[in-house]
Structures are given as structure tokens and as C-alpha cells.
Amino acid sequence: MSGGVSFTIDVEDHWADPLGELRYEQLAWEVLGWLQGLGVRGSWYFVGELAQRHGDLVAAVAAAGHEIGVHGWTHTPLPELSPQRFRDDVRRAKGVLEDLGGSPVIGFRAPTYSLVRESLWATDILAEEGYAYSSGVSSRRNPLWWYPGVPPHPFRWPSGLLETSGEFARVGRYVYYFGGGTFLRATPWWMVREGFARWADEGVAFLYCHPYDFDPGEERFRIPDVPAVLAPLLWAGRRNTWSRVEALLQNAAAPLAERLDEVAALASAGRADPISLADDGTVTGARPWAGRGALRVQAGSSLGGLRHTWLGPRPGSLPKEFSHG
């Protein structure tokens, strides 16, 4: 992977069981220490109300050289907010995080990748409020939110805001996402690794995760508004997270804020600087990326034995608080 992979994490509370134990803060501290041991700096997107509650964590993350970004004031999908409420939220979160971290905040990630046509107004507000880039859109259909027609590679919104955009991969006719969360944990390892290898060669690759992705010991509970058939996926493969992420970070890249020249260059090369949009948010005009498709990955792999090929590197010594379950 010549270009490397950036580490990103969304610090949120995992729709916590109101009667259960809140584990995200301790997990975030564990991940911070682990990254320091690996010599890796990344991008940390904080829900503002949680950052205000745990200012010492934000300060420690910033002191370790990581980028601090915004993940909303609350973990609310953008279409559920009014434009004014969104403006108030991102302004407040930016101010709190800049005070706690001691440096400018220029990155935003929409909760659950909910930057869609119905919330396109957010891109204008973010630019007006001093944000330089967004990392919160999906170009293909998935279980969360997606924005039809936008490029699968970096691009610029008409407001001037840069967008990182997450990549998908293809094996034969099967298209899959591999970049973070459940997809990174539970997808066969060879598909994850080869997807990142292609992405790092061709673009600005980044993985994303949450504190709970590193928590195989969390007690299972039913999360409101998540279909019963999908709920188990939120726990699937958590024992793989530490070792998979560590393997991908053997070729770690800088935080996303330090890669914006690369993002802008790829947007220009892809003739998406900026993209054209109709008043209703529909992507219009020439779309040279439309025939590009997902990253092509070969089915064959020489990663080693069957276990390694499908599950990935064996988990090392997990932090003891989270090594059981």
C-alpha cells in the first residue's frame, strides 16, 4: 500500500443502553495509548456534548498530535436537524473543541454518513463556519445513508468544501464496502486488506472506527430503531478490530487534515472540482466518474493459511478490561 492508510475514529456513545455501563471513554483512552505505542497519529471526530464532558480526553488527543474534528453536537443524522440548528451545533462544537484542543478545527464527519441530498444545505453552512473538509458521504447504497451520483473519489462541493468520499471494492460482480465499523470487522480479511491496498495506491485511503468497535466484552443489548436481524452485526468481529487495524496501520498515513492537498489534487484530476448540483441536490453535468465503478480486487490471495485469509492476523494481547466476553 504505497499511499498509506489514515486512522480515523468517531467518538460517540454507541446509542448506549440507558441502564448499562458507558464504556466509550475508557475505550477511547485505551485506543489513544495503543496508537501512541504504534507511533500513529489520526483524526478524532468528537460528538460535541461528549467532548465537553471529557475535556481531558480531547486535550490528551490533541497533545499527542492527532487531528481534532467534529461529529456533530449530538449524534443526530443531518436530515433530522433544521439548517439553523445544524449551524448552531457545528459552531458550538467547533468552539468547544478548539478551546479544549488548542488548535483550529477544520474537519467534519456527519453522523452515520448522513450528508445526503436532503441535507445538502450543510455543505454551505460548514464552509461558512470555517470548515475546510467533510468526511461524511457515501457514494453507493448501504444500510445507512448515501448520496446517489457523487464521485467515489475525493471531490469539492459547490460551496468550496472538500469531501474525502469512501471507496467501495468489487470482486467479480460483488461490490462491497470495507472501510470501517462492522464492514472492517466482519468482512473476510483478504477482502479488507486488498481493498485498502488498491485504495491506498489510487486515492486517499482512511479507515474509520468507533470506541465500541474495540470492545468485544460489551454486554449485548437491543438498540432502539435497529432491526432485530441487523442488531447482532454491531457486535460481529469485534475481536478482530485491534489486530486488523494494527495490520493496516503498518503503512499509516497522516491525519486527513494533513492530506488535503492530496484530496484537492484528486478532486481536480477526477474533474470534480467542484461537482455540479441542481437546486434539489441532484448531481448534474458531466460525470466522468460514472463509469469508473468500484475498486477491482482479485479473488485470489496469498495471505497465508485459511484462518489468516478469512479472519486476519491473530489478536494480540488486548487491553485486559476488554479482552473477554
Image (cartoon, helix red, strand yellow):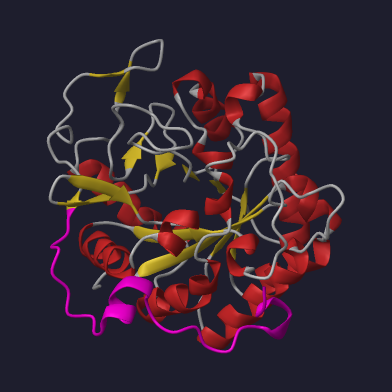
Q: Is residue 235 in view?
A: yes
Horizontal side of 257 relative to 169 (left or right) equals right
Residue at left offset 18%, top offset 36%: 289
Residue 316 located within the stretch drawn in magenta: yes
**For the C terminus, which image quadrant?**
bottom right
Q: Quadrant of the N terminus?
A: bottom left
Q: Quadrant of residue 108?
A: top right
Q: Which residues are magenta?
A: 296-325
Residue 80, percent from left and from top? 64, 23
What residue appears at the point 38 percent right and 73 percent down from the top-left corner? 311
Residue at the (50%, 70%) spot, across then down: 241
Give the x, y percent position of residue 234: 57, 53
Residue 230 against residue 182 in the figure, above or below: above
Point 87% across, 51% down: residue: 19
User: Along the horizontal axis of the image, is 211 left or right of 160?
Assistant: right
Closest to the observer, 33 or 126: 33
> Front-most of 49 and 59?
49
- The number of numbered discs placed on residues in the rendered structure image is 0
Q: Is residue 51 magenta?
A: no
What x and y, as percent, mark residue 277? 33, 19
